[in-house]
Image (cartoon, rainbow, N blue to C red):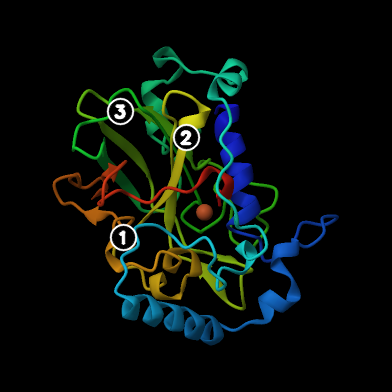
Amino acid sequence: MSSTTETFEDRHREHDAVPATPPPGLPADPAASSDAAADSQSQLSEEMERIQRGYEASGEREHGPRLDYAPYRSSVLRHPTKDPHHVDPELIELSSPAFGHRDVGDLESDLTIQSGGEPIGERIKVRGRILDSAGRPVRGQLVEVWQANAAGRYIHKRDQHPAPIDPNFTGVGRCLTGQDGSYEFTTIKPGPYPWKNHRNAWRPAHIHFSLFGTDFTQRLITQMYFPGDPLFSLDPIYRSIVDDQARRRLVAEYDHEVSEHEWLLGYRWDIVLGGSNRTWTEPEEDER
Ligand SMILES: [Fe+2]
């Protein structure tokens, strides 16, 4: 897979899923200090409820995540406190790698056929469209995904929690959107995994999405969740979007029309890039 995807994965692992046990020789992640990890889920839930009540009483409407959201412990010291600094995109574009349509193979959107054997888990298809604020399709868009395997384990040196690696599943894939803005991935449903935000902290199952734009300066990153996950109300990352409608836009719908007879279950998830119904995407400075 491209170096671009490896970079996403590295960044993701740094901020999102701090492994329960650091690999030998590596110091514990400072964001996962014993103080933070000592907090209980009930402490965290109480904090999140208090913030939620404050939001609902305010009468304001927010469409994105709160960057200053204390229950997400590892973001407390690193979240941006100033407006983004704008740089001349031409300077970046001159030295950034670019991709062409010929660089993305048709089979790269099927994460179940990348190795010699069948990966373990629930085979699924995720299908959707990338749309702008006016509902127009965004064509020829590079869409990249990365995810844990069915057991909740990433293939990454910093993920050492005791769940099995699947030798037939890398968890990365990509495709280009079609003329109607559509994308489609065949994959394995990812499992939830522990992280060291607090005691017994578990991320809801999710797939990371990256939309490239035409160059690095336009790259957008977000996460897709699965309907009915019991971990939603417990997860500080999901709940850092305090508006319920806004965070529900990150949850895919089960779609029986996408499911295939005796083969897989289907989900549908559209990404809207602007307007009041836009799908939340991570600020460039705060990828997780
Ligand atoms: Fe993740």
In the rendered image, residue 213, in percent from the top left (x then y), is placed at 41, 28
Q: Where residue 44 appears, x then y in whole percent? A: 53, 80
Dot 2 crowding, Cα within 10 Å, few <14, some 14–19, many 20+: some
Q: Nearer the viewer, residue 246 or 104?
A: 246
Answer yes or no: do the residues labelled 1 and 2 have beta carbons within 8 Å? no
Say which label, 3 or 2, has the lower sequence index. 3
Q: Confirm whether residue 278 shows in the render.
A: yes
Q: Quadrant of residue 177?
A: top left
Name the residue: 52% across, 60% down. 67
Residue pointed to by mark 2: 219
Quadrant that contains the N terminus: top right
Q: Mark 3 or mark 1, which has the lower sequence index?
A: 3
Residue 21 relative to residue 272: left or right: right
Residue located at (39% from left, 15% from top): 101
- Label 3 to label 2, Cα distance in Å? 15 Å
Q: Nearer the viewer, mark 3 or mark 1?
A: 1
The kind of residue tagged 1 is Ala
Residue type, numbered disc 3: Thr
| Residue at x-position 26% and y-position 36% | 132
In terms of secondary structure, where does tag 2 sit? loop
Rate crowding at label 3 as few (under 14), some (14 to 19) or many (20 or more) other CA atoms within 10 Å: many
Q: Amino acid at mark 2?
A: Arg
Residue with the mark numbered 3? 177
What residue would you read off at disc 1?
Answer: 246
User: Would you identify the image quadrant in which residue 139 lies?
Assistant: top left
Q: Position of residue 7 (x, y in %)?
A: 61, 36
